[in-house]
Image (cartoon, helix red, strand yellow):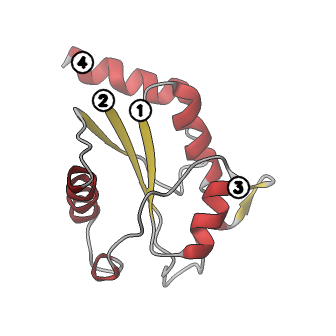
């Protein structure tokens, strides 16, 4: 089972709401969500956010957010690995475990499904 985690907190200090800004007619986060979905690699795509507004946008893009991120993990200095660990633990509490965990950045609008497939091939090769 493969889990894609897309961190998207709402409190960006440099560019407000950068994760949901319009990029070529779609919210920025919509592009990596679409790439992950179209790759066919993931059993679950989870957007890790603290924002009900972001949840609404993600739902409009066709994905569900099963739970909001702990506010303690929404600070500027919290690293992605801490967010990933927390999300994996939350899923485990809900009886769901995954073999592979992928980090996909919300601000990667040029990511394509083929990029993810090539990444998997490289991972398996090495």
Check residue 60 in the rendering and tell me which mark sits there, or answer none.
3
Q: Nearer the viewer, mark 1 or mark 4?
A: 1
Answer few, some or many: residues within 10 Å of disc 1's Cα (few below 14, many 20 plus, some between 14 and 19). few
For marks 2 and 4, give the CA distance.
Answer: 15 Å
* Cα–Cα gap, marks 1 and 4: 18 Å
For the C terminus, give its image quadrant: top left
**Residue at position x 22%, y 32% from top?**
99
Question: Quick one: SS at disc 1?
Answer: loop
Q: Dot 4 corresponds to which residue?
A: 124
Q: Which is more N-terminal, label 4 or label 1?
A: 1
96 sits left or right of 31 in the view: left
Tell which circle, 3 or 2, labels the residue nearer the N-terminal end.
2
120 and 94: which one is in front? 94
Contact, mark 2 vs mark 1 (Cβ under 8 Å):
yes
Percent of width and height locating residue 52: 56, 74
Q: Is residue 64 above or below residue 75?
A: above
- Measure how far apart labels 3 and 4 are at the Cα level: 34 Å
Kindly check if marks 3 and 2 are in contact, taking CB atoms under 8 A apart as contact: no
Cα gap from disc 2 to disc 1, whole angstroms = 6 Å
Which of disc 4 and disc 2 is earlier in sequence? 2
Q: Quadrant of the N terminus?
A: top left
> In the visual, does 95 lie left or right of 103?
left
Tell me: 96 left or right of 52: left
Asked whether the beta carbons under mark 3 and mark 4 sit within 8 Å of each other, the answer is no
């Amino acid at each position: 089972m493969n889990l894609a985690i897309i961190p998207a907190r709402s409190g960006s200090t440099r560019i407000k709401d950068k994760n949901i800004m319009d990029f070529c007619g779609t919210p920025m986060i919509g592009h990596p969500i679409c790439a992950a979905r179209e790759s066919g690699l993931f059993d679950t795509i989870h957007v890790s956010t603290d924002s009900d507004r972001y949840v609404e946008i993600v739902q409009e893009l066709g994905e569900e957010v099963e739970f909001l991120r702990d506010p303690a993990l929404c600070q500027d200095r919290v690293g992605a690995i801490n967010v990933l660990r927390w999300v994996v633990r939350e899923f485990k509490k809900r009886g769901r475990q995954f073999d592979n965990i992928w980090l996909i950045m919300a601000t990667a609008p040029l990511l394509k499904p083929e990029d993810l497939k090539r990444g998997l091939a490289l991972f398996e090769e090495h």
